[in-house]
Structure formats: C-alpha cells, structure tokens
Amino acid sequence: MNEAENKVAALWGWDMDGFKSENGDFSATVPLNKILGFAEDYAKIVINCKHELILNRSNSNINSIIGTEDVAHFQIDIKRIQWRVPHVKVSDRERLKLLKHLERDKLIQMAFRNWDLYEYPLLPTSTKHSWSIKTASQLEKPRYPLSNIVRKLT
C-alpha cells in the first residue's frame, strides 16, 4: 500500500506499525472494494444472488509477519471472521418493480476488474524502445495504464 492507502486503512483498523492490544489480538475491517474489484464503483443493488467469500490460507504464517525477531515460532490463530454485506429493504412497490425487472431477464451489467502486471526487467540501453502490451476485449478494457521506471543509482 502507498502512504495514502495506509492512512485510510488505519480507519478500518489496519495498522502496519503493530498491534495496539496487550494480548496481541487484531481486529480489522476490510472494505469490499479492496477484495472484490466490481465494488470499486458499482452503486446498484444485487438482487437474488448468492454471495460467497472463499479464503485460502497458506500452511505457514511467514508471509503474514513483518519483523526482525525470530519469526519461525510465531503463530496466528483466526478466531472469528464476519462477512458483513449490507442488505437493502425496499418498499412493496419497489420490490414489485425489481421482480418485474428480473422476470424480463434483462442483463444487469457488472464490470469485472482485473489487475495484471507486465514486467520488462531487461530494458535495452538505447534512448527509444517499443514494448507491446496485451490488449483486452471490450468488457475488460483497461481504464488507465500505469508505468514505472526505476533507475539504479550507484
């Protein structure tokens, strides 16, 4: 995370500097737009859909720890995970409108967000260089490309 995202993440309870409780308990809220790409700018309701969150955990905790001490004996115990999805209750009139919309089988567009990293580690020493980048279909069209140039200072 960059510095601005780190400050915003502190509002959710995420703190990169360490734990605040004496017994080591950690509690955080992660907004839906950080784990599901469509939630970045999707402002409509989703009706009659099953929501599922699948978490895959590694066998070791080594990627979860930041520190210089001996981390081989460190242990993380997950005690509770809550999946909170806001539910919208509408009036009977609006519910009938939504159900009629569903009966018509009209498609509801929900864009899928996908982040890809294309790395070019060995750039030539010339002053100009062309680099081809993968194109995408209309549904997955990129919103903006990001470029980063790093120069080693010796």
Image (cartoon, grey):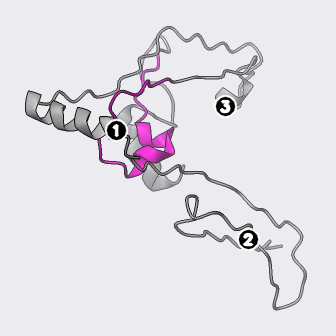
Q: How far apart are marks 2 and 3 (CA)?
A: 26 Å
Residue 146 lies, in percent from the top left, at: 61, 68
Task: Looking at the image, tell me whether mark 1 or mark 2 is earlier in sequence order.
Answer: 1
Q: How crowded is mark 1: few (under 14 residues within 10 Å), some or many (20 or more)?
A: few
Labels 1 and 2 touching (C-beta < 8 A): no
Q: Distance between the residues labelled 3 and 1?
A: 23 Å
Q: Which amino acid does label 2 sit on?
A: Val
Residue bearing the label numbered 2: 150
Using the image as rendered, state which of residue 109 and residue 133 is in the foreground: 109
Q: What residue type is labelled 3?
A: Gly
Task: Specify the farthest residue to the bottom.
Answer: 127
Residue bearing the label numbered 3: 67
Q: Residues within 10 Å of mark 3 (few under 14, many from 20)?
A: few
Q: Which residue is drawn at 32% across and 41% down?
A: 104
Q: Report how many numbered discs are placed on residues in the image.
A: 3
Taking the magenta stretch, the answer to whether it contains residue 28 is yes
**Position of 104 compared to 140: left or right?**
left
Of the numbered discs in the image, which one, if any, rests on residue 118? none
Of the numbered discs in the image, which one, if any, rests on residue 11? 1
On screen, residue 102 above or below 116: above
Q: Main secondary structure of the magenta part?
A: loop
Q: Residue at x 79, y 73 (%)?
A: 153
On screen, residue 96 above or below 118: above
Residue 34 lies, in percent from the top left, at: 48, 41
Using the image as rendered, state which of residue 72 and residue 150 is in the foreground: 150
Q: How crowded is mark 2: few (under 14 residues within 10 Å), some or many (20 or more)?
A: few
Residue 70 lies, in percent from the top left, at: 75, 21
Nearer to us of marks 2 and 3 is 2
Span shown in magenta: 25-52
**Position of 96 compared to 30: left or right?**
left
